[in-house]
Amino acid sequence: MKRLIAICGLDCEKCDSYIATKNNDQALREKTAKYWSELNHVTILPEHINCEGCRMDGVKTVYCSSLCEIRKCAVAKGYSTCGDCAEKETCSKVGAIWQNNPEAKENLKA
């Protein structure tokens, strides 16, 4: 499995925060901050849009580093990804991601 597959199975290489970080793209940071602010009804600033990947060493967005319940759960259980968890098929946390993005579940099988 690629290291840039997140704990939940999403592909970090497709994430605007990851792309903005890797390309040092300030316009994309601004666009993403605005969109995520509207989507989540919170203030997200362009400087918050920095991430090198969920399972990689280095900077992560505030959400990914400390707010993501999926990431917290997997780390607490010592799992590299949700694919390692026996409860994955009935988990409501990761299930919500997989329902909206079936490719994420497939990424964990690779």
Image (cartoon, grey):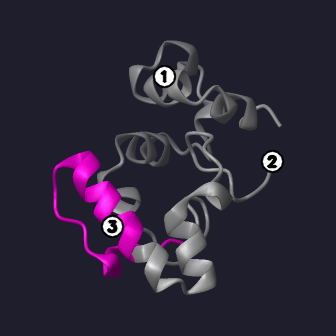
Nearer to us of marks 3 and 1 is 3
What is the C-alpha distance between the residues marked 1 and 2? 20 Å
Amino acid type, callout 2:
Met
Amino acid type, callout 1:
Gly
Quadrant in the picture for residue 84: top right
Main SS of residues in magenta: helix
Instruction: Give the side of residue 96 with respect to residue 83, left or right.
Output: left
Quadrant in the picture for residue 101: top right
Which residue is pictured at 23% across the width and 52% down the height?
A: 38
Which residue is pictured at 16% across the width and 56% down the height?
A: 42
Q: Which residue is mark 1?
A: 95
Residue 57 visible somewhere in the drawing: no
Q: Which residues are magenta?
A: 30-51
What is the C-alpha distance between the residues marked 2 and 3? 29 Å
Residue 3 spot, x, y in % from top left: 73, 58
Q: Which residue is mark 2?
A: 1
